[in-house]
Each structure stands twice: as structure tokens, then as C-alpha cells.
Image (tube, helix red, strand yellow):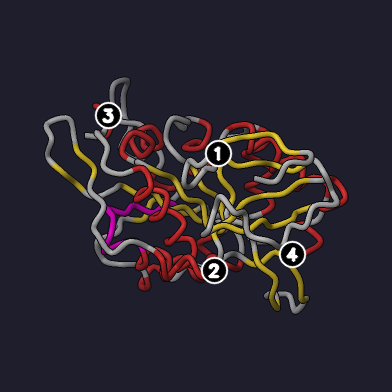
Amino acid sequence: MLELGFKKYLCSVCAIPSCRSTDSEIDRSAASPKHPHFKIAAFQPARGICIFGVAADAAEEVPSSDMLISQGNNTPRKPRVLLAASGSVAAIKFGNLCHCFSDWAEVKAVATQASMHFIDKAALPKDVPLYTDEEEWLSWNKIGDNVLHIELRRWADVLVIAPLSANTLGKIAGGLCDNLLTCIVRAWDYSKPLFVAPAMNTFMWTNPFTERHLMLMDELGISLIPPVSKRLACGDYGNGAMAEPSLIYSTIRIFFESRGPRVAGSNNS
């Protein structure tokens, strides 16, 4: 455990006591000795913020056993993963992301209107339903009818927003809920995990607003899967590209495998 300028907290993925830096001089390239599958990714070194993310080689370390969740009647079932995409070019990978999860988990998908510009519906697994803003109130006619964003929140064991655009990041940090996805987040039960994988231009990622928004989300207990450096869709080279779908899948699976089988609540049965 590194000693200088840290306060202990529980790692969001493996629940091992870890540390967060307040010292900008720390070497953030080194893997934490308490987290063999983690390495520290600096966001704004000058401000002393560091974020833990699953290292790229963790994809090879995912346990091979199937993860089952026990319902109230002790009947095992697969994890229920709600995947969501917001309006970033990285949404072109959303079909791939859904395929990564579909064999291991029960999957439902949510997409914002902006993300639909990049998503190929035909590329989604046939057994994965896709919900958009248009479906939000279609099934509601009177008091007592189901409300879609509440039903999806009740159904899911985990919410994964990938990609998370700068715009949707700002909305979530500000508590706005003007579409299906942000309504789900605003109504989210934070006893259940919520992961985000941002995707944006490098200058948007390093913008001071992004730091403020991430700090607010961290206070809510939302876990970050950091972006990576590469040639971006706009042609710039730098940090801001969404983590690969296989890495996002590995992160979520490691999280569930580390917790072991658990009993689903009455709302998830």
C-alpha cells in the first residue's frame, strides 16, 4: 500500500481496500501491489486525481466459470446487465459490446437518440432488446401502468454506460433526466453497481468541467472505466477513446466473479 497522500477506500471492482492519491508526484504508471489486475490511470496529474481501471491484460484473467445469481427461491440465474450507449462515435462498437456480454449474462440495451446515429440495429444480438426514448412512455396509459425507466432499473443487476459522451456525463453530474437513459440513472438504486466508459475528444476529456463531473459521479459511487489513448475519430491523437468492448466486459465480469454468488432482491426476481 502506498503511504503518502492517500486515503483508504474500497476498490469498486474487487472490493479490496485501496487508496486514492492526493499527491501529484506519485508514479501513476505502476500497478498497485494490492491490485494485481489494476493499474492507476492519471486524469489530471496536476490536481492529484487518479482513477483505478482494469489493466488491458486482465481480459486474459477472467474466470472461466459461469456466474450465477440466486433468486429469492434459490433458483440460479445469469447476471442481468443493462448496457447503455450515449451520443459518441464510439457507439459504433455498441453491437460488439452487446455480443461480448450476451453469452454470459441476460442483456438489455438502452440507446439515446444521438447514439442511434452510430448504432447498427442489425449488429445487435437478436435476443437483446433495444430501448430508445420513443419507448419510454409507449406502454403507459394510466396510473398503475409500468414506467419503463423504473422497470429497467428494477430488472438490472448492473448498469454499464458505454460509451459515455461528454454531454451525458454533464447531464448525470447535474442530475438532469431528459431522456430514457438519464431517467434510469436518476432513479438508480446505488446499492447496485453502475459503470461508465467515457469516450470524447482529448480536449473534452481534459476540460476542467470533466474533472468536476467525474468527482461528482465518484461521490455517487459510480465506477469509471478510463478511456485510452489512440487516434480518435476526429483525427486527433490522444486520450479519450472508449476502452475496448472486451475490456469493458472483463471489468464487469471480474467485478461479479469477485463478489461470488449472491441472492437477488425481490425487485430483481
Residue in the foreground of this view, choosing between 74 and 166: 74
Task: List x then y, in percent, for residue 157.
Answer: 35, 41
Residue 205 visible? The answer is yes
Residue furthest to the top: 143
What's the amino acid at mark 4? Asn
Q: Position of residue 134 (x, y in %)?
A: 43, 48
Q: Position of residue 111 (x, y in %)?
A: 47, 54
Asked whether the residues under the numbered discs 2 and 1 touch, taking CB atoms below 8 Å apart as contact, a structural biologist would say: no
Residue identifier under label 2: 56
Residue behind mark 4: 201
> How far, Cα to Cα, is label 2 from label 3?
33 Å
User: Which numbered tag is attached to residue 215?
Assistant: none
Looking at the image, is mark 4 or mark 1 earlier in the sequence? 1
The Cα atoms of the two marked residues, 4 and 2, are separated by 21 Å
Would residue 36 appear left or right of 265 to someone viewing this image?
right
Task: Report helix, strand or loop for mark 2.
Answer: helix
Compute the Cα span from label 4 to label 3.
39 Å
Report how far apart the C-alphas of labels 4 and 1 lie in the structure.
Answer: 33 Å
- The span picked out in magenta is 101-110
Q: Looking at the image, is mark 2 or mark 1 nearer the viewer?
A: 1
Q: Which residue is mark 3?
A: 265
Q: Mark number for residue 17?
A: 1
Q: Residues within 10 Å of mark 2 (few under 14, many from 20)?
A: some
* First of labels 4, 3 by sequence position: 4
Magenta stretch: residue 107 in it? yes
3D distance between C-alphas at marks 1 and 3: 26 Å
Tell me the mark number nearer the camera, choosing from 4 and 2: 2
